[in-house]
């Protein structure tokens, strides 16, 4: 297989599919979870399939085997880190609104690079239901900001130096405006207060959101099944 997962995820919601050995399925997903430590390109597929471990069906088992066939096809894929260069942290953030047809929850995806290549990434189902694409992006940005704060502290300890402001590249203009202008908060009172953490970080100058076109959004592969992998 040349991609980790088929672009159409509707089949995963097929309740009529026959049940399979849950223990075997969980073992396979456990192995795949371990591989996500070095293979960010399978993060979304593993994240999606791991949500079916309670009552796995045959269609989910096929999806797991699809990932393994993809790994066999891409054994030569690797992350390359160049020696030297500028020690500057920057990240990418993206979300997929209502990715799950059953629970109506979106998926957050983010990744961070330090110099030459990625050092941190995640693909995670959001805990709350977003009412719009902007809200889903805003919630994802908050999670990314928390990761950025942790990485800044870790790098500051490793290099004994202050880390410059972290640029976070986002493809949603409305989300960027919400983090810069407090006036927009009148329209977002329904969003849980803890998600406004990103606004505080922007005001402090710890992070800065910048726009990036969707076609250049690296973290896109962490939020949906893409036809071609960017990583």
Image (cartoon, rainbow, N blue to C red):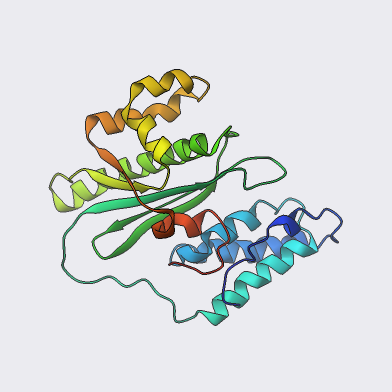
Q: Quadrant of residue 219?
A: bottom left
Residue closest to the eye, 187 or 145: 187
What residue appears at the point 60 percent right and 34 percent down from the top-left corner?
129
Relative to 20, does residue 97 appear above or below in the rendering? Answer: above
In the image, residue 160 lies at what x, y percent?
13, 48
Residue closest to the eye, 171 or 89: 171
Residue closest to the eye, 12 or 122: 12
In the image, residue 102 lies at what x, y percent?
72, 43
In the image, residue 11 lies at what x, y percent?
75, 59
Quadrant where the C terminus is found in the figure: bottom left
Q: Quadrant of residue 56?
A: bottom right
- Direction from residue 128 to residue 138 in the image, left or right: left
What residue appears at the point 51 percent right and 63 percent down from the top-left corner?
34
Residue sitting farthest toward the left: 161
- Direction from residue 214 to residue 89 in the image, left or right: left
What residue appears at the point 42 percent right and 55 percent down from the top-left corner?
121
Relative to 211, does residue 132 appear above or below in the rendering? Answer: above
Relative to 138, does residue 50 appear above or below in the rendering? Answer: below
In the image, residue 208 lies at what x, y percent?
27, 40
Quadrant where the N terminus is found in the figure: bottom right
What residue appears at the point 57 percent right and 65 percent down from the top-left corner?
32
Q: How many marks?
A: 0
Residue closest to the eye, 201 or 61: 201
- Direction from residue 81 to residue 6 in the image, left or right: right
């Amino acid at each position: 297989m040349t991609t980790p997962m088929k672009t159409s995820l509707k089949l995963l919601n097929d309740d009529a599919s026959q049940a399979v050995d849950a223990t075997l399925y969980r073992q396979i997903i456990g192995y795949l979870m371990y591989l996500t430590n070095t293979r960010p390109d399978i993060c979304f597929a593993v994240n999606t399939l791991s949500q079916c471990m309670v009552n796995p069906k045959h269609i989910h088992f096929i999806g797991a085997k699809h990932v393994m066939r993809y790994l066999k096809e891409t054994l030569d894929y690797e992350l390359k880190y160049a020696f030297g260069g500028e020690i500057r942290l920057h990240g990418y953030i993206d979300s997929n609104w209502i990715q799950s047809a059953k629970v109506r929850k979106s998926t957050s995806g983010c990744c961070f690079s330090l110099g030459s290549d990625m050092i941190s990434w995640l693909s995670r189902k959001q805990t709350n239901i977003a009412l719009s694409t902007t809200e889903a992006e805003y919630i994802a940005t908050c999670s990314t900001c928390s990761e950025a704060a942790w990485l800044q502290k870790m790098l500051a300890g490793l290099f004994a130096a202050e880390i410059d402001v972290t640029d976070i590249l986002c493809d949603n203009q409305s989300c960027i405006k919400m983090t810069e202008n407090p006036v927009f908060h009148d329209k977002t009172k329904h969003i849980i207060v803890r998600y406004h953490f990103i606004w505080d970080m922007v005001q402090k100058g710890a992070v800065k959101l910048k726009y990036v076109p969707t076609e250049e959004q690296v973290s896109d592969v962490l939020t949906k099944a893409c036809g071609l992998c960017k990583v």
